[in-house]
Image: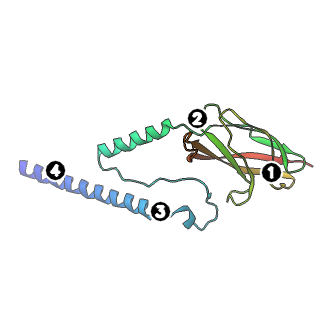
Amino acid sequence: METKSKSGNQKLIIILLIALIALLAIVLVVVLGRGKAEDIPDGNTPLIGYSTEAKVMLDQDSLQAAFDEALKNAEDGFVGLKYQNDAYSTNGTDFECYIANSESNIYDMFLTIYADAELSDQIFLSGLVPPGSGFENITLDHALDPGDHTVFVALTQVDTDEETGEQTIKNQAMHTIEFHVTK
């Protein structure tokens, strides 16, 4: 009886190992099979942002190292924005709005506003905005037509080395705001 039990346990272990290997193979195919954003032909993929290389963690030490790195990156701050969701204009160019770099941020940021989801129609680019500062009015590079528009606000945090003046992009995020143009 004990021989049959050992044989059954061995078969179960082999089946579980085969299932685990198959699962890992599927994960690798999915991770390695992903194309880059510029390879996606749908035209709806934002052109701004960042990505990280995907890694399969096979042991606890690798997983812990990745977690520790993520915590270290989180210490650099986050992208906080204070804004009103609606901005108004009567001429399509000059907007009353409230957009500010949150005082809880630790980095200056600049704002890039796009009129389209493809991020091809840039309508505003700010200079560096320190934490706690922002805009109550902005003037667009070109007018929007009368009506309601969802605009895409790309926030880019920049760290400036005080000794060298070298600037490094730390974080990026995307928000949407409704711009309304009335006659």
The numbered mark, 1 or 4, whose residue comes first in the sequence reads: 4
Q: Nearer the viewer, mark 1 or mark 2?
A: 2
| Marks 1 and 2 in Cβ contact (< 8 Å) | no
Label 2 crowding class (10 Å Cα cut-off): few <14, some 14-19, many 20+?
some
Residue assigned mark 4? 9
Residue assigned mark 2? 106
Residue type at mark 1: give it.
Answer: Leu
Q: Callout 2: helix, strand or loop?
A: loop
Here the colouring is rainbow
The numbered mark, 3 or 1, whose residue comes first in the sequence reads: 3
- Where does the image place residue 167, in percent across and percent down from the top left? 58, 47
- The residue lying at 62 percent from left, 37 percent from top is 80
Q: Which mark is residue 34?
A: 3
**Left or right of residue 35, residue 175 in this image:** right
Q: Nearer the viewer, mark 2 or mark 4?
A: 2
For the residues labelled 2 and 3, the Cα–Cα distance comes to 34 Å
Q: Quadrant of residue 85?
A: top right
Residue type at mark 4: give it.
Answer: Asn
For the residue pair 20 and 12, the one nearer the viewer reads as 20
The numbered mark, 2 or 4, whose residue comes first in the sequence reads: 4
For the residues labelled 3 and 1, the Cα–Cα distance comes to 37 Å
Label 1 crowding class (10 Å Cα cut-off): few <14, some 14-19, many 20+?
some
